[in-house]
Image: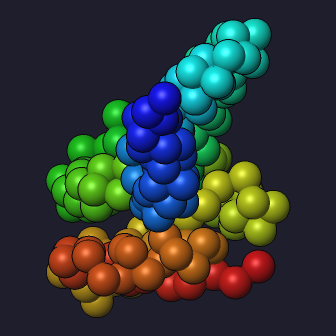
Amino acid sequence: MNDTYLYLIIALLPLTAGMLVTQTNPYHALVIRGVLGAIAAMVDAVLGAADVALTEALMGTMLSITLYAIAVRSSLVLRLGVIENQSIEKNQDSNFQQLINEFRQIFNKHYLRLEIVPYSNNQSLQQALIEKEIHATCVRLEESNQTEETYQTAIRVQRIYNIIESELSSPKTILKYFHV
């Protein structure tokens, strides 16, 4: 009996697993995880373990992919704290709006969503950063010698700080890494 097709299918398992662990995009990893589960179910079915194949297809592939997708989607949010009267809906300052738009463009490239969280005053904003409720703050500097308004962006996540530092082209903000 010629079992070369079985060896080819089984060889796809480590190949797919290797592709899975090297993915940087979490959504691509989810798709490859689904392919890995489908291949495992196919191997089980070909080897005569229909019950294991069905379990792998339902639980190992469909359910886990759904749960992973929910977890990945909820974890890819960057929370930016701002002062309430500075929030984008109420703010008429075009510099702030341009800065927020540039932040959104940068984060979109890295599969992150930007969520703006308004706080009533500077103290509560800083406390939220210390207590890790938010990932970064963006507040207006109160320097009167500046002709244009300048903002200070404090970021507590080193990786996010590195991304923004390398990709932000706007001179409207001063970046600061905030180590908690």
Q: Indicate the quadrant where residue 103 lies.
A: bottom left
Q: Residue at x 46, y 55 (%)?
A: 15
Where in the figure is residue 93, as x and y percent of width and height?
24, 53
Q: Indicate the quadrant where residue 132 lies.
A: bottom right
On screen, residue 97 above or below 132: above
Where in the figure is residue 56, as x and y percent of width and height?
68, 22
Q: Residue at x 47, y 64 (%)?
A: 22
Where in the figure is residue 13, as x and y percent of width and height?
53, 46
Q: Residue at x 35, y 34 (%)?
A: 89
Asked if one can make out residue 96 in the rendered structure from this viewpoint, the answer is: no
Furthest residue to the right? 131
137 relative to 15 in the view: left or right: right
Count of marks overlaid on the render: 0
Query: Which is nearer the eye, 105 or 1?
Result: 1
On screen, residue 32 above or below 83: above
Furthest residue to the front? 1
On screen, residue 135 above or below 37: below
Query: Which is nearer the eye, 21 or 88?
Result: 21
Name the quadrant of the C terminus.
Answer: bottom right
Asked if one can make out residue 103 in the rendered structure from this viewpoint, the answer is: yes
